[in-house]
Image (cartoon, rainbow, N blue to C red):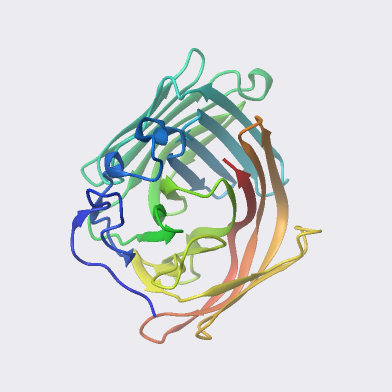
């Protein structure tokens, strides 16, 4: 029972309640967070509203990611990279008190998201069916440095997973996930230079806005790659918080079109994340195994803000059935899956 939304409108009404609940193939709701009303003292509400833009790039050699986030109490800027062959991982982040210098766009389909620091600059610009990513961090990894100039193609007919669900009475999760965006440009990490070509490199976006419970947990899994026949294929799976009775964010993305799943179960060993994971859905349309080859552990403890992420990189294999009934055989599709606990 999944509710697909098709009518444009505001996210919140004048009393702070969600106007619609469900999912859509395109971003159709205006993110009017100024209408949020979940504290009696409204001027303090900005401390609990979370906003982020997280981009990930799958090249033939590595995964590269950059994020600009405003968590209310503080901004959070981080960049990391994972080498698929060696498993080498490195991440660095900045915590910005009260998000000074952090700018995020109101909606996911237009506008600029920017962080301008003394030695670190990240810029995500959206314009005319393209997304321009510019990242410069000269001191990354003890001066090894990392720089990226990347263009992601996102034509108007490219579908994405847009979801809006309640968390309790007045809290909510508003999110857009875009998979399989053809990428071109350049990436430099130390002495390693990569030229990115759209026939072998794909990008993705996790765009999130909302108000969570202070203590939260979620699972997320994602992949963007190519089938053996050349078609672009992606996965977006998630669970763990909010009321998903009207909609989940679970889907297959095939050549830019969403194929919707209902509930998906994450099966893994939280005592040993590097063991094989399994994913199956409630309609017998998805059966995947996930074999990790590298683990990213990100731990933050700032008193009020505590976060522990175990993000596993590995290969998906199995099968998925499209909305039309085609059974896809998925073999060694590189992606990730994560276990995330947060107090924020």
Counting every numbered tag in the picture gives 0
> Which image quarter: residue 111?
top left
| Residue 245 x, y percent position in the rendering | 44, 73
Q: Percent position (x, y) of residue 1? A: 39, 80
Tell whether 8 sits left or right of 179: left
Q: Residue at x 61, y 67 (%)?
A: 316
x 30%, y 49%: residue: 16
Query: Image point 80% across, 59% down: which residue?
Result: 272
For this orientation, the residue located farthest to the front is 40
Q: Position of residue 216 (x, y in %)?
A: 59, 51
Residue occupying the far right of the picture: 271
User: Which residue: 37% across, 81% down?
Assistant: 323
Q: Quick one: 172 or 289, which is closer to the camera?
A: 172
**Foreground residue among 6 and 179:** 6
Residue 54: x and y in percent read 47, 42
In which quadrant will I find the C terminus? top right
| Residue at the outermost left position | 8
Depth check, front residue: 100 or 59:
100
Q: In the visual, does 127 lie left or right of 269?
A: left
Q: In the rendered image of this protein, does residue 290 appear above or below residue 46?
A: below
């Amino acid at each position: 029972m999944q509710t697909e939304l098709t009518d444009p409108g505001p996210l919140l009404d004048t009393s702070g309640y969600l106007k619609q609940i469900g999912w859509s193939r395109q971003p159709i709701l205006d993110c009017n967070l100024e209408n949020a009303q979940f504290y009696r003292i409204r001027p303090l509400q900005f401390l609990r509203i979370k906003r982020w833009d997280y981009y990930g790039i799958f090249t033939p050699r590595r995964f590269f990611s950059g994020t600009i986030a405003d968590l209310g109490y503080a901004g959070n800027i981080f960049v990391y990279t994972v080498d698929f062959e060696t498993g080498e991982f490195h991440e660095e982040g900045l915590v910005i008190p009260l998000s000074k210098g952090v700018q995020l766009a109101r909606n996911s389909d237009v506008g600029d998201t920017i962080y301008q620091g003394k030695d670190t600059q990240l810029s995500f610009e959206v314009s005319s069916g393209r997304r321009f990513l510019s990242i410069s961090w000269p001191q990354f990894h003890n001066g090894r440095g990392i720089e990226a100039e990347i263009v992601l193609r996102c034509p108007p007919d490219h579908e994405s997973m847009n979801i809006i669900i309640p968390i309790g009475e007045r809290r909510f999760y508003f999110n857009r996930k875009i998979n399989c965006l053809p990428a071109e440009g350049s990436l430099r990490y130390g002495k390693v230079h990569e030229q990115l070509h759209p026939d072998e490199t794909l990008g993705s976006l996790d765009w999130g806005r909302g108000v969570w419970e202070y203590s939260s947990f979620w699972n997320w899994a994602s992949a963007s790659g190519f089938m053996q026949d050349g078609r672009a294929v992606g996965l977006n799976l998630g669970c763990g918080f909010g009321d998903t009775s009207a909609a989940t964010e679970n889907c297959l993305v095939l050549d830019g079109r969403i194929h919707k799943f209902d509930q998906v179960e994450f099966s893994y060993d939280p005592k040993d994340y590097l063991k094989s994971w399994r994913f199956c859905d409630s309609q017998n349309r998805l059966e995947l195994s996930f074999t990790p080859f590298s683990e990213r552990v990100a731990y933050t403890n700032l008193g009020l803000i505590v976060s522990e992420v175990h993000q596993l990189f590995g290969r998906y294999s199995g099968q998925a059935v499209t909305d039309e009934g085609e059974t896809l055989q998925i073999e060694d599709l590189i992606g990730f899956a994560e276990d995330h606990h947060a107090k924020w």
